Image (tube, rainbow, N blue to C red):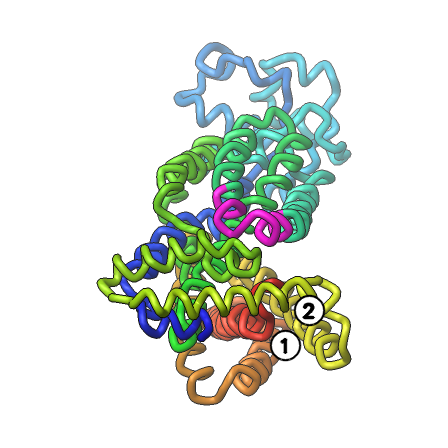
Amino acid sequence: MHYDDILHQIGEFGPYQKVIFLLVTVCSLFAPINVISQAFLAGTVDHWCDVAAWTDCDCSVEPLNAPEVSWCSELKKNLSIPWTDQQGFDQCYKYDLPQEWIHNCSTIVDTEAFNVSGRVPCDEGWVYDRTQYKTTITSDFDLVCDRKSLSDVAQSVYFGGILLGSAFYGAIADRFGRRVSFFACTSTTAVLGILVSVSPSFVMYVVTRFFLAASAHNTFLTGFVLVSEIAGPSKRVFTGMFFQYVFAIGIMILPLIAVFINSWKVLQLVITLPGFLTLALLPVITESPRWLISQQKNEEALKIIRKTARFNRKQLPESIFHVLCLYFKETNEKLQENASVFRLFRTASMRYRTINLLFNWFVQSFVYFGLTLSTESLGINLYLGYFISGLVEIAGYTIAIFLIEKFGRKLSLCGLMSIVSAACFLLIVIPEGIPRIIIGMVGKCTISATFGIIFVYTAELYPTPLR
C-alpha cells in the first residue's frame, strides 16, 4: 500500500483538502499583486522643469492680476518650458532665462521679453501633474529624464529577489516543511511591505522590494507544492491548474484597488496589511503528509491522515495503518539512499529532463512577465488593461485543463508555445489599436496556459524529496 492508495479511501480531494486549498489560495494572492504593483506605484505622470524663484509668486496682485491660480501656473509653464509639436511640453529641459528675469515676478507677464532659444536641463527639480496620482515613486524619487530607467532597474532587482527567494525558501520547505516555509513567506511579506511603504529613498525602496519579492513570490510557489501534495492522483491536475487562478485573480484585484487610491504609499499598505491576517490560519493549515513521510516523521503523517479521514467522514480500519507503517519503513530506507539533489543530474535521462524543464521555465517566465508588465504598451488604459490581462489568464488556465486531459502535457505545451511565438512576432509589426490589443491578449492567454502546464508537469516528473 502507498500513500496514494490511502487517499483513494479517505478522499483524493475531499472537504478537508478543499478547505486547505482555499486557505492557501487566499494567502497566495500576495505574489501576483506584488509582482505587478510597481505598474501602479510608479504610475506615469506628466512633468516639467521647476523654476523655483517663480514658485512663490503671488498671482493675484499687480502686475499679474491672475483671475485664477491655475491661470498663473499655466503661464509660468508656457514661458519657461519649450514646446514641440511632436511631444508637447518638453519634460527634461527649460529655457535658459537670464537670472534678472527669473527673480522678478513681474517679468512673467512680459511675454515679449521671453524670446529665448537656448535650453538647459532641469536643475531645480520638476513640477508633477497631480491630476491622476497624488504621489508615485516617480514623483517622490524624481525617476524622470536621466533617471527614468531606474524604475525598470527596480523591477529587474525585484525579479532578482524572486531568484534568491526560490533558493532560500525552497531549501526551508525541504528542510523544515512546506507549512513552515509558507508561513515564513506570508509573515515576512507583511513586514517588508510596510518597510517598502515608508521608504524615504529610492535605494531603500529597491532594497526592501528585493527582499519582499523573495518572500511574496515564494508564498505562491510553496503554496503550489503544498496543495499539489495533499491531492490524490486523479485530482492533481485539477488542483495544480486551478491554483494558477490565484495569479490571474491577483492581477485583476490590484487595478480595482488602485483606481481608488492615488498615493503609492497608501496603496502599498493596503496590499500589505492583510498579510498579517494569514497568521490566524497557522493552526488550521497542516503540513504535507508526503513531506512528513519523506522526512521519516511517520507519527505526524498518521495524525494528519486520521484527521483528514474524520473531516472527510471516511472510516479506515486500523489494519490499514499497520500496512501503511510498513510502507513508511520501506520508503524511509529508500530515501536514506536516494534523497539527494544531485539525483537531478545523476543519470542521462534525469539530466535531459532537468535541463529541458529549466529551459522551458526560463522561456515561459521571460515571455509571461514580459507580456504582463508590458500591458500598458498595447495602447490600452492601465487599469482596464491589467484587469483584462487577468481575465484572459483565467481563460488560458481553463483551456489548459481540457487540453492536457485530451492531448497530454507535452503536446499541449508545444502547441501552445507555437501560438505564443506567433503572437509575439506579430506584436513587433502591428501598430497600436484594437488588432494589437487582441494579439497581445491572445499571447497572454496562451503563455498563461503553458505556465500552468509547466507547473503541473514539473511537479509530476519529480518525486516528493526533489519537488
Residue 399, position as x, y percentages in the image: 41, 78
- Residues at discs 1 and 2 in contact (Cβ within 8 Å): no
Viewport quadrant of the N terminus: bottom left
Is 180 one of the magenta-colored residues? yes
Q: Is residue 438 above or below residue 188?
A: below
- Foreground residue, 92 or 70? 92
Q: Say which residue label 1 marks.
A: 425
Element carrying mark 1: helix
Residue 247, position as x, y percentages in the image: 45, 58
Element carrying mark 2: helix
Rendered residue at 48%/60% (across/down): 224
Q: Is residue 417 above or below residue 228?
A: below
Label 2 packing within 10 angstroms: few (<14), some (14-19), many (20+): few
How far apart are the alpha carbons under marks 1 and 2? 23 Å
Whether residue 432 appears in this view of the structure is yes
Query: In the image, is 467 to the left or to the right of 135?
Result: right
- Main secondary-structure element of the magenta-colored stretch: helix
Query: In the image, is 333 to the left or to the right of 100?
Result: left
**In which quadrant of the rendered view does residue 339 lie?**
bottom right
Say whether disc 1 or disc 2 marks the residue closer to the N-terminus.
Answer: 2
- Foreground residue, 467 or 96? 467
Viewport quadrant of the C terminus: bottom right
The residue range painted magenta reads: 169-183
Label 1 packing within 10 angstroms: few (<14), some (14-19), many (20+): few
The amino acid pointed to by label 1 is Phe
Residue 454, position as x, y percentages in the image: 56, 72
Query: In the image, is 53 to the left or to the right of 33?
Result: right
Q: Is residue 369 above or below residue 149?
A: below
Q: Say which residue label 2 marks.
A: 358
Rendered residue at 56%/65% (across/down): 464
The amino acid pointed to by label 2 is Leu
- Foreground residue, 112 or 270? 270
